[in-house]
Image (spheres, helix red, strand yellow):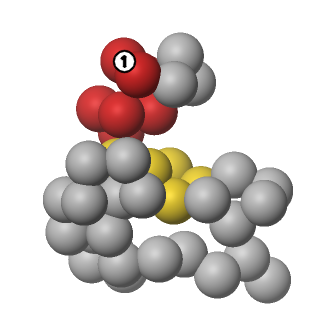
Amino acid sequence: MLDMKTNCEKCGVALPTNSDDAMICSFECTFCNSCSTNLLHG
């Protein structure tokens, strides 16, 4: 099971565990949807 962090690792925005805005990669990096899409080209 992957471990999601409570904040975006890029911009620091809070990401509650039930948030639809959280993105997690297979290395357990956690980003908000905005950073994933716009900054990381996710």
18 relative to 36, above or below? below
The reply to whether residue 12 is visible in this rendering is: yes
The residue sitting at the left extreme is: 13
- Foreground of the two, 2 or 7: 7
Q: Residue at x 51, y 25 (%)?
A: 40
- Foreground of the two, 36 or 1: 36
Residue 2 at x, y percent in the picture: 73, 76
Query: In the picture, which quadrant includes the C terminus?
Result: top right
Q: Residue at x 42, y 58 (%)?
A: 9
Q: Residue at x 78, y 60 (%)?
A: 27
Residue 12 at x, y percent in the picture: 25, 60
Query: In the picture, which quadrant includes the N terminus?
Result: bottom right
Task: Say left or right for 12 vs 5.
Answer: left
The reply to whether residue 19 is visible in this rendering is: no
Residue type, numbered disc 1: Asn
According to the picture, the residue beneath numbered tag 1 turns out to be 38
Task: Say left or right for 14 vs 31.
Answer: left
| Mark 1 closeness class: few <14, some 14–19, many ≥20 residues within 10 Å | few
Task: Say left or right for 28 vs 31.
Answer: right
27 relative to 18, above or below? above
Residue 25 at x, y percent in the picture: 69, 52
